[in-house]
Image (cartoon, helix red, strand yellow):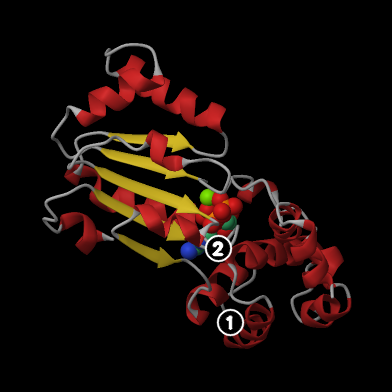
Amino acid sequence: MHQFFEEDLGKQHIFLLHGLGGSGKTQTELKFIQESSSRFSDIFLIDTSTVETIDTGLKNIASTKNVGSTADDALQWLSSQPSEWLLLFDNADDPKINLHKFLPQCNYGNILITSWNPGLQVYTGSDFLVSDMEEPDAVQLLLKSAAKDFTSRNQVIAAEIVKALWYLPLAIIQAGAFISKSGALGTYLDLFKKNKAWLLREQPTQSHADYGWTVNTTGQISFDQLSQPAKTLLQL
Ligand SMILES: Nc1ncnc2c1ncn2[C@@H]1O[C@H](COP(=O)(O)OP(=O)(O)OP(=O)(O)O)[C@@H](O)[C@H]1O
Ligand SMILES: [Mg+2]
């Protein structure tokens, strides 16, 4: 991402982070901003879940910059600013929303989109699939969220658990929350194999309340958006 946004493309930079719910797209985006805040003149975060939240996000830009009160005022202002602004379209997950309408039409500026939908690649110059964590990071995250010591024995047990959890951050945090409550690191894997659906519905602890969904709900939301024939095919 650093390389992409630093390169002189002679056109607008648009980058897509896509992947499953809970795979770490927003965390990656936040880390990127933290590491490169001095590069951008202005950073605007737009909740892209619905047309209404996008409208609110754009109106906020217009009022913050004193350039009007509507979403169009904000888009026009951005299109007339040949500077290094960064627009973050977070959670652009709904495939029915036409994002094109909300992208400032000009050759400059920077846009970063996070979405469950890899189809948004049509808008971008580059993209990245956020998926599983590296094993050492995953082990560290599990032991930290489970409040367990980083002993070599715990690391071996944790490595088996994170493998069973597809190295997915959200699943690891949920497992960690469960283990910290029950205290049972050694027996978690057996329990998970027998009660997968139930454990994936467990809400993480308050310390991770930044993310409101569970692995189970993110899967259900994607499933609900499918057409009936697609649902039937998956069920088969
Ligand atoms: N690299 C990481 N290290 C530690 N925790 C992480 C990491 N990546 C993600 N998490 C945690 O996993 C949870 C989900 O991450 P995040 O919100 O970034 O997912 P997302 O891909 O943006 O999901 P969604 O598509 O539903 O918005 C959060 O609680 C976050 O703190
Ligand atoms: Mg997100």
Q: Is residue 180 above or below residue 79?
A: below
- Label for residue 23? 2
Q: What's the residue at 75%, 53% (across, down)?
A: 224
Question: Residue 213, position in %: x, y?
Answer: 69, 50
Q: CA distance from mark 1 to mark 2?
A: 26 Å
Q: Which quadrant would the C terminus be assigned to in this image?
A: bottom right
* Residue 106 shows in the view: yes
Which of pointers 1 and 2 lies earlier in the amino acid sequence?
Answer: 2
* Residue 146 shows in the view: no
Mark 2 CB near ligand 1 (8 Å cut): yes
Q: Which quadrant would the N terminus be assigned to in this image?
A: bottom left
Q: What's the residue at 51%, 70% (across, down)?
A: 131
Q: Which residue is label 1 attached to?
A: 151
Question: Residue 170, position in %: x, y?
Answer: 62, 61
Residue type at tag 1: Thr
Mark 1 CB near ligand 1 (8 Å cut): no
Q: What's the residue at 67%, 45% (across, down)?
A: 212
Q: Is residue 33 left or right of residue 190?
A: left
